[in-house]
Image: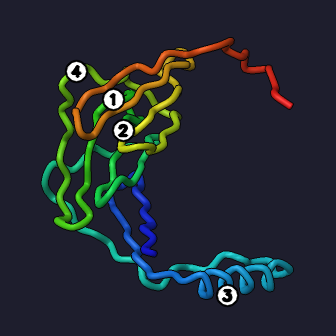
Amino acid sequence: MFCYLIFYNFELKIYLNIEHYTMESLTTQAAQVDNKSNSTNTRTSPTSWTLLECTENVPSQRSLHVGVVLDDAFYIFGGYDGTQRTNDFYKYDLYTGKWSVIHSENSPPSPRDRHAAIVYDRCIYIFGGFDGVNRVNDFYAYSVSKNIWTEVPNKGKTLSSFSYIF
């Protein structure tokens, strides 16, 4: 199994660490972390991170965006560029090392930051966030194969921010 660990920071640098893990190596790593739990410093620095230089179609600096991996690509959507929320959508090809702007066939979700994203069944799902004035409670799916955004309808009762499910 291959594991992509990607960090995209505010300064537009991408760090990539690709490791081959077996169940035995994961168990050993977990045991090592557990044995250090009494220590004041349980974090260790990765020793095989590589800074990837990118020059073309590089997204603007940003924070509070989302990033997901699907197949051999890293996608980012939205965020805050220091002056405004964005709704731009980028793809980074992990093999070619190139960024591309995704221009969908229809309008993307509104500009936002602090939203959530997941990948399921070849779609990228975006939920909620903050538009600069209000918290948004919408839910969108981006179909990679069709290159379209679709709003996913809410079914059932919307809970207030103070509601809890037990």
Marks 2/3 in contact by CB < 8 Å: the verdict is no
Secondary structure type for disc 1: strand
Q: Which of labels 2 and 4 is toward the front?
A: 4
Marks 3/4 in contact by CB < 8 Å: the verdict is no
Inspect the image, locate mark 1, and give the three-letter code of the amino acid beneath it: Asn
Relative to 89, residue 2 above or below: below
Q: Residues within 10 Å of mark 1 (few under 14, many from 20)?
A: some
Point 20% across, 64% down: residue: 97
Q: Nearer the viewer, residue 29 or 111?
A: 29
Q: Residues within 10 Å of mark 2 (few under 14, many from 20)?
A: many
Point 41% across, 43% down: residue: 121
Point 21% across, 50% down: residue: 58
Position of 76 with respect to 33 (left or right) is: left
Residue for badge 1: 87
Badge number at residue 77:
2
Quadrant into which the C terminus falls: top right
Inspect the image, locate mark 4, and give the three-letter code of the amino acid beneath it: Asn
Secondary structure type for disc 3: helix
Secondary structure type for disc 2: strand
Inspect the image, locate mark 3, and give the three-letter code of the amino acid beneath it: Thr
Residue for badge 4: 106
Point 79% across, 20% down: residue: 162
Marks 2/4 in contact by CB < 8 Å: the verdict is no
Q: Position of residue 114 (x, y in %)?
A: 52, 34
Q: Residues within 10 Å of mark 4 (few under 14, many from 20)?
A: few
Residue for badge 3: 28
